[in-house]
């Protein structure tokens, strides 16, 4: 259980003293100090007060060691993006930082893909990956770059380096978001994502119409990184009119399927 160390960490990140917190919670300073020092255990009602004060779900306060989370994830928690509030488990991300404690952007090359499937949650493996910084990206988010292979996402060229933003709460994904999806069976996939939480699955679409959509159960997905940009030495070919028409028709068909599913669920 991590409540003692977590409330101490969160208090210090807010720049508050024990006296300021105890006054706000209408308790003696010695009582609150006892909770941080492990001398006393707060009851259920006090744990609720602590949860409300720090804006972090009780499950997170008690079960998750916040000290191992990167600063970007801690900021998300403090901003209210606590997935325990949605009834799901917190996805603890293995990451690295530079000498100034800024999150690095780790690079997963084509050769490293197989190892990433096994070692994505292993801090030792992640520390072995090449790292770099991109100054135009937000310091409030966590990014990672993956080299893609194949032509399923044309006009994005083969062997491009795609940078994605780590998505902790998948409910914030929008229909049509391009994402790097780490699946437990097939490894890394770069696709357009469509969530169908009624069936507890994602439907993944390729930009290249020669590839059929595939369905992946939510429980078989380990990580999702939302597309931010890509780097390539090639200039992508422009879409021809037939491809543009196909994309419009495909979007219409997808909307029709969604409307039919909604009608069926109402019945």
Image (spheres, helix red, strand yellow):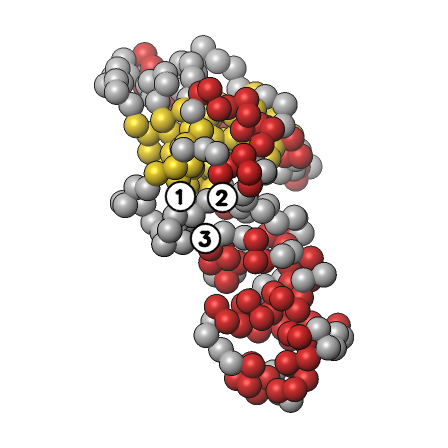
Circle 1 is placed at which residue position? 104
Q: Earlier in the sequence, mark 3 or mark 1?
A: 3
Q: Is residue 196 visible to us here?
A: no
In space, the residues marked 3 and 2 are separated at their CA atoms by: 10 Å
Circles 2 and 1, Cβ within 8 Å, touching? The answer is yes
Which of labels 3 and 2 is toward the front?
Answer: 2
Q: Is residue 4 visible to us here?
A: yes
Circles 3 and 2, Cβ within 8 Å, touching? The answer is yes
Circle 3 is placed at which residue position? 72
Circle 2 is placed at which residue position? 95
Q: Nearer the viewer, residue 58 or 178?
A: 58
Query: At numbered mark 1, what does the secondary structure look like: helix, strand or loop?
Result: loop
Instruction: Please tell me which residue is depicted at 58% across the width and 32% down the height of the picture.
Output: 119
Instruction: Please tell me which residue is depicted at 25% across the width and 18% down the height of the picture.
Output: 234
In the rendering, at what x and y percent does residue 231 appear? 30, 27
Q: Is residue 132 above or below residue 86?
A: above
């Amino acid at each position: 259980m991590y409540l003692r160390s977590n409330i101490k960490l969160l208090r210090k990140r807010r720049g508050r003293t024990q006296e300021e917190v105890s006054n706000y919670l209408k308790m003696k300073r010695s009582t609150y100090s006892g909770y941080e020092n492990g001398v006393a255990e707060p009851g259920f009602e006090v744990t609720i007060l602590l949860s409300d004060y720090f804006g972090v779900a009780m499950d997170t306060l008690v079960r998750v060691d916040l000290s191992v989370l990167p600063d970007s994830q801690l900021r998300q928690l403090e901003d209210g993006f606590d997935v325990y509030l949605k009834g799901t488990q917190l996805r603890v991300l293995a990451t690295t930082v530079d000498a100034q404690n800024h999150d690095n952007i780790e690079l997963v090359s084509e050769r490293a893909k197989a190892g990433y499937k096994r070692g994505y949650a292993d801090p030792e493996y992640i520390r072995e990956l090449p790292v770099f910084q991109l100054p135009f990206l937000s310091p409030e988010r966590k990014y990672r770059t993956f080299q893609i292979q194949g032509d399923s996402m044309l006009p994005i060229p083969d062997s491009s380096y795609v940078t994605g933003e780590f998505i902790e709460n998948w409910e914030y994904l929008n229909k049509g978001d391009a994402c790097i999806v780490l699946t437990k069976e097939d490894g890394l996939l770069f696709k357009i994502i469509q969530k169908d939480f009624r069936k507890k699955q994602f439907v993944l679409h390729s930009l290249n119409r020669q590839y059929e959509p595939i369905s992946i159960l939510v429980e078989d997905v380990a990580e999702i990184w939302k597309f931010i940009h890509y780097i390539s030495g090639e200039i992508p070919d422009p879409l021809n009119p037939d491809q543009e028409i196909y994309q419009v028709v495909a979007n219409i068909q997808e909307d029709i399927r969604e409307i039919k599913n909604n009608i069926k669920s109402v019945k």
